[in-house]
């Protein structure tokens, strides 16, 4: 008895679970009329009646095209009101799902017997409805939603040609946006797929005629998205169909939304692997900024594109003095060698671009932040907190402090970086004692550190460094030459003291002075693309003297040229470096510093992608 009762219970449970599973198989279709509210039941009955009337299920002779159109209008109204804001699957869509195949069959029969304006209009309207239903019911690969919309567009076009005012007056209802954002998003995705399919089939991407039907929809969808704060989707669609230039024709981009559009374009550029696409995206952002008179942002994009030819036009068109100064600060930061001419504030603007007041402004900020007091390496090491005392407190057994060459060299670098630009420190500026606690390259680093401590302060810095240029120690002189270059890094001076002081050493006989002068010129004129400096350094790269020191001079001169012409793709510099690499012997290429020559070549094409291909082939 117990076994029979258990089996009976299990059978009942199985039936219950089976019912539940059947009920949950398709939750979007409401099967139980009793589970629906009175309002839902009325909606379902009304839609089913309209579908029955539309397809003339009972084949009644009294059902004319006009009656069918009225039934279809009810369906259109219900769908549009439900899909305008889709937070869940709209109920009209649920109720019409079982009728989808029936409506598709009927759509295929419309116009078989006659092609009157009313019949065309009926087919076009039904095509709109089926396009919306296909959004959730159609097969993804077949792009049914788009196909119905394209067929409907042809019917509307035929109606317009027929000139029947009774129906064409209402064709404005064919507005894509009236079906809601979700439909627009779904349709945009299918347009991208269809475009790619046609390109793969052999259509020319530059030929608008091959994609006229798709581009017609794109011209409607893009403004709709921009007007409804979906700028990113509008840009994505234009990129998908390779028509990004059309964004410049949009009247809907104004002072309220151009920032969002341009920001998205600039961020999108980072993901463009093709150089032409990269340039096109940035060019669109540049034109939009320029159109809105945002000259600073336009300059920022132009510099990113390497389009320095746009600088004079942007500077001349900008009438806001504050914005113009900000543009000059940007040029100064990018080390652009540009001179303002014909402006009322010409002198002040050129001072900004030349970074002539940079040291002064830096010290003002430091004073406001109360960080002007010089720091020592020990302030950074804090070795008194360590149990071992650290390398800066090495002592002999008797307790005397031991000077370590490596520890002193480390302290020189730490001291230079922690006091960079402040103009004072506690090791080098008070006296020369620290300098002679080092040897050879350590002395060179110590004297060069003065350039970093006096960074950007050309007048005062040169006064302190000048005496070391006449030292009897070769390494001290070399360090001073390097300090001159570091000191004037990015600073433009009418007297051009850096070139004047280092010129003689480039053509001198001292190997260590040549190396220091090359590096100093590279640091001082980085990004300036100065031809006179290039002419000074090129002979060093071209030299073919055999010797252990020759390759070091060649490599450092090549690196300096790469820094001076960074990202400029200069043919003369690139050709010279490549030629020298090709002529170099295996022994020279094995030199530890030969990689600097390659680094200089790389800097020359920094961020320029395909422009480096010719050099790579060479």
Image (cartoon, rainbow, N blue to C red):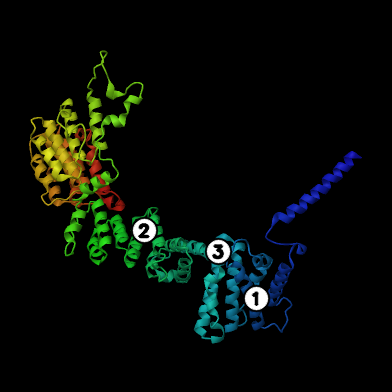
> Rounded to the nearest whole Å, what is the CA distance between mark 1 and mark 2?
46 Å
Contact between marks 1 and 2 (CB within 8 A): the answer is no
The percent position of residue 473, horizontal first and vertical second, equals 10, 30
The percent position of residue 207, horizontal first and vertical second, equals 39, 68
> Rounded to the nearest whole Å, what is the CA distance between mark 3 and mark 2?
28 Å
* Residue 321, quarter of picture: bottom left
Q: Which secondary structure lies at badge 3? A: helix
Query: In the rendered structure, which disc, 3 or 1, sits on the residue that comes first in sequence?
Result: 1
Q: Residue at x 23, y 51 (%)?
A: 335
Quadrant containing the N terminus in the rendered view: top right
* Residue 96, quarter of picture: bottom right
Query: In the rendered structure, which disc, 1 or 2, sits on the residue that comes first in sequence?
Result: 1
Q: Residue at x 50, y 82 (%)?
A: 160
Q: Residue at x 42, y 71 (%)?
A: 209
Contact between marks 3 and 1 (CB within 8 A): the answer is no
Identify the residue position indicated by label 2 in the image: 277
Circle 3 or circle 2, nearest the eye: 3
Would you say residue 526 is visible in this rendering? no
The percent position of residue 575, horizontal first and vertical second, equals 19, 48
Estimate how packed mark 2 is, as few (under 14), some (14 to 19) or many (20 or more) residues with alpha carbons within 10 Å. Answer: some
Identify the residue position indicated by label 1 in the image: 74
Identify the residue position indicated by label 3 in the image: 182
Q: Is residue 442 above or below residue 161?
A: above
């Amino acid at each position: 008895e117990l076994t029979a009762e258990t089996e009976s219970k299990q059978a009942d449970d199985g039936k219950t679970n089976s019912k539940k599973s059947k009920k949950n198989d398709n939750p979007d279709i409401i099967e139980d009329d009793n589970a629906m509210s009175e309002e839902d039941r009325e909606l379902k009955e009304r839609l089913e009646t309209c579908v029955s009337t539309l397809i003339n299920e009972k084949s009644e002779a009294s059902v004319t095209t006009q009656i069918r159109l009225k039934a279809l209008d009810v369906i259109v109204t219900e769908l549009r009101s439900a899909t305008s804001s889709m937070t869940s699957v709209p109920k009209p869509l649920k109720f019409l799902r079982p009728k989808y195949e029936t409506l598709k069959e009927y759509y295929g029969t419309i116009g078989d017997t006659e092609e009157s304006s009313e019949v065309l209009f009926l087919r076009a309207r039904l095509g709109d409805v089926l396009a919306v239903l296909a959004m959730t019911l159609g097969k993804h690969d077949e792009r049914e939603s788009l196909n119905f919309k394209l067929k409907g567009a042809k019917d509307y076009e035929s109606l317009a040609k027929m000139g029947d005012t009774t129906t064409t007056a209402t064709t404005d209802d064919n507005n894509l946006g009236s079906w809601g954002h979700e439909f627009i998003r779904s349709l945009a995705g299918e347009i991208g797929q269809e475009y790619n399919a046609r390109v793969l089939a052999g259509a020319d991407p530059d030929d608008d005629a091959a994609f006229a039907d798709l581009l017609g929809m794109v011209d409607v969808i893009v403004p709709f998205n921009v007007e409804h704060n979906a700028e990113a989707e509008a840009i994505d669609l234009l990129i998908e169909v390779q028509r990004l230039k059309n964004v410049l024709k949009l009247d809907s981009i104004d002072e309220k939304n151009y920032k969002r559009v341009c920001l998205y374009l600039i961020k999108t550029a980072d993901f463009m692997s093709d150089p032409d696409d990269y340039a096109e995206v940035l060019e669109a952002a540049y034109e939009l900024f320029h159109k809105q008179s945002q000259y600073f942002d336009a300059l920022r994009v132009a510099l990113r594109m390497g389009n320095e030819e746009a600088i004079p036009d942007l500077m001349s068109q900008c009438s806001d003095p504050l914005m113009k100064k900000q543009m000059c600060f940007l040029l100064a930061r990018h080390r652009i060698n540009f001179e303002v001419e014909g402006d009322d504030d010409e002198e002040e603007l050129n001072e900004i671009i030349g970074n002539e007041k940079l040291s002064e402004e830096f010290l003002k900020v430091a004073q406001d932040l109360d960080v002007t007091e010089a720091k020592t390496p020990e302030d950074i090491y804090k070795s008194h907190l360590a149990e071992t005392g650290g390398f800066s407190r090495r002592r002999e057994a008797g307790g005397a402090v031991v000077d370590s060459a490596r520890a002193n060299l480390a302290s020189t670098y730490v001291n230079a970086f922690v006091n960079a630009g402040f103009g004072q420190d506690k090791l080098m500026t008070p006296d020369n004692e620290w300098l002679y606690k080092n040897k050879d390259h350590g002395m060179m680093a110590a004297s060069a550190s003065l350039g970093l401590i006096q960074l950007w302060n050309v007048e005062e810095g040169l006064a302190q460094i000048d005496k070391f240029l006449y030292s009897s120690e070769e390494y001290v002189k070399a360090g001073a030459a390097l300090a001159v270059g570091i000191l004037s890094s990015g600073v433009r001076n009418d007297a051009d003291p850096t070139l004047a002081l280092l010129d003689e050493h480039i053509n001198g006989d001292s190997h260590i002075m040549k190396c220091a002068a090359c590096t100093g010129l590279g640091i001082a004129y980085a990004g300036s693309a100065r031809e006179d400096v290039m002419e000074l350094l090129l002979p060093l790269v071209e030299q073919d003297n055999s010797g252990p020191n020759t390759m070091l001079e060649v490599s450092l001169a090549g690196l300096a040229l790469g820094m001076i012409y960074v990202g400029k793709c200069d043919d003369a510099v690139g050709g010279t470096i490549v030629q020298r690499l090709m002529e170099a012997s295996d022994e020279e290429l094995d030199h530890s510093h030969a990689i600097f020559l390659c680094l200089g070549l790389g800097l020359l094409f920094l961020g320029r992608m395909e422009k480096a291909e010719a050099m790579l082939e060479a």
